[in-house]
Amino acid sequence: QNASDKDVFTEPFPQCVCVCVYRGLFSMTKKSSSSSSSVQALYDLCKKTFTPSGTPASSSQAIQKLSSLLDTISPADVGLKEEYQEDDRGHGSFGLNPFNRVGRWAQPITYVDIHECDSFTMCIFCFPTSSVIPLHDHPGMTVLSKVLYGSLHVKAYDWVEPACIQKGKKPVRLAKLAVDKVLTAPCGTSVLYPKSGGNLHCFTAITACAVLDILAPPYQEAAGRKCTYYHDYPYSTFSIGTGDEISDGKEEDYAWLAEIDTPDELYMRQGIYKGPAIQI
């Protein structure tokens, strides 16, 4: 049965990957009880762990406890049915039209909002094969990512400190490569921090895949947490030739990042959360 227009948001998302502006516009959860669900346990632990301001920073023990719980979450726990995990349209079982056979280049990444509050966001990104969330940052945020199924290439950077900036027609800032690998489910939870772990990252779907994310605190432009996109250039592109900017590692471990507008090819649509309801 086709989803109704009320169930599906079909336009590309604006500036922020995590679409905090859409909070409250969609009824994403069922009304059934979920007191014993894994998602409920995840919500409860997030509520204990995070604050709206992100300060004080959560302890390493608290993040590890949350990571360990995320490691146990399966696709079924968040309403992803097994038969949809090979779906190459990125729609999963979130109420989108299963008969829409548009070319892959036009297929959206499906964003599913599980819960959002002032302290954290719980959400799912469901990717068609070869789809990309371009390089973007998470200012002042901690993000935990769990690949639920499929394979995802992650390339991530951290800013070089103190800031090394080349000024010109297109200002660029030096960053160091932190992550460049393929994550294939089942695998452990990845964590990025405000200044380490690959705070600026790009996701590319090697196969159809889904990622469960926890972002704390959420994107909020008024609080200085605006999602910004970047293009990465090889170190040699803007290097002055002395290599003085490099304190450790090799040139290939560094890149210059230039801020860009939200890429036109970033195409997302809203899906419907079909996992257990959360008791707030």
Image (spheres, grey):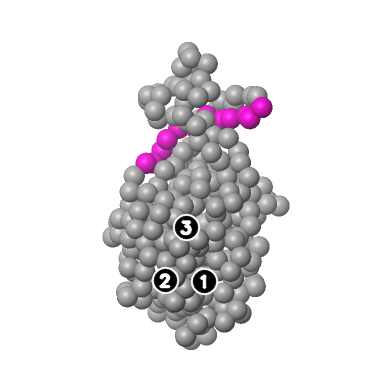
Task: Judge whether residue 177 is colored magenta.
Answer: yes
* 193 or 62: nearer the viewer: 193
Position of 192 relative to 278 (above/below): above
Quickly name the residue at label 3: 105
Per the picture, the main secondary structure of the magenta-coloured stretch is: strand
Identify the secondary structure beneath mark 3: helix
Q: Is residue 55 visible?
A: no
72 to the left or right of 22? left
Quickly name the residue at label 1: 271
Q: Position of residue 186 (x, y in %)?
A: 28, 60
Please say if the residues under marks 1 and 2 sit with CB atoms less than 8 Å apart: yes
CA separation in Å, label 1 and label 2: 9 Å
Q: Amino acid at mark 1?
A: Gly
When asked about the image quadrant of residue 248, the answer is top left
Q: Earlier in the sequence, mark 1 or mark 3?
A: 3
Farthest residue, direction right: 222
Quickly name the residue at label 2: 92
When asked about the image quadrant of residue 261, the answer is top right
Position of 113 relative to 260 (above/below): below
